[in-house]
Image: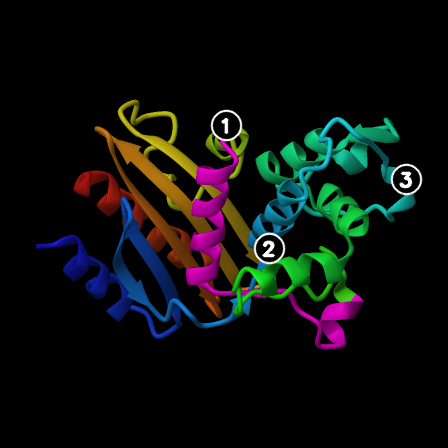
Amino acid sequence: MSLKAELDLIIAAYKEPISICMYHTNELFYSHLDHEQLPAASVIKLAILATQLNRQEDLDQVIDVSNTPQVGGAGVLQLLDQPEWTIKDLLKLMITVSDNYAANVMIDHLSMATINQWLAQNNYQETQLQRRLMDTAAVKDGRENVISAADALRLFRYLLKTFPQTRNWFLNQQFRGKLPLTMDETATDVQIYNKTGEGPFVDHDVARFSKNGQSIDVAVLTDGFTDRLAVISMMAEIGQLIYRAL
């Protein structure tokens, strides 16, 4: 059975929407609801990262993080006493440990307007930053960060191609329990670069699988799954299918 047919079977087993965009090298290989806007969760950090790196600012510039209110959730910055950090280290934290506080510091440094302007200018029409991370009051007011699988994958591929320093950040990203779940630390013949996102009934993963000189890039976005074990199992199965297809 082909990879496309197996993906169709996986999707058919669930009534909840699953958005998928997949490229084999530079060709669109598979898509399903890939332009549907969903809550972005931490995948919005790809937009923050792309905007910052495009400014060609000195990444060794120091920022006083105490000017941004601390938030919880993923990350370690909230637990550390050091008040000043370089932009580069904040970006690394934002990607490798999905640090929400670091992301909010970067949003304040850039401004939401600047990030949304960059997205609009570069034709990311299905992605919008409308609140800081962990801002539950904004969510209650109806302001949500949104993204599509197509936009998420295009952002991810753009970052890997244009800014080589990010490859090591995505390769060493610490949240590996979705697409790479069954092969992380066990399959030595594949490199997996990824960035996850999660929230209430939301689970996403955007990844590159590289093996034998070939690569498959994929974004899998979900919303509305009440059974989180089911969605994680589904993503792990997709990861295995990709691994076997390479």
Asked if one can make out residue 176 in the rendered structure from this viewpoint, the answer is: no
Please tell me which residue is depicted at 46% across the width and 58% down the height of the picture: 228
The magenta segment is 137-164
C-alpha separation, residue under disc 3 versus residue under disc 2 = 22 Å
- For residue 168, which numbered disc appears in the image? 1
Q: Secondary structure at mark 2?
A: helix
Nearer the observer, 57 or 234 = 57
Instruction: Name which of mark 2 and mark 1 comes first in the sequence.
Output: 2
Q: Which residue is mark 3?
A: 66
- For residue 44, which numbered disc appears in the image? 2
Percent x, y of residue 166: 53, 33
Where residue 134 sits, quadrant-wise, is bottom right
Amino acid type of the residue tagged 2 in the rendering:
Ile
Instruction: Name which of mark 1 and mark 3 comes first in the sequence.
Output: 3
The single residue placed furthest to the left in the displayed view is 1
Please tell me which residue is depicted at 85% across the width and 38% down the height of the picture: 65
C-alpha separation, residue under disc 1 versus residue under disc 3 = 28 Å
Nearer the observer, 81 or 83 = 83
CA neighbours of label 1 inside 10 A, class few (<14), some (14 to 19), many (20+): few
Q: Is residue 147 magenta-colored?
A: yes
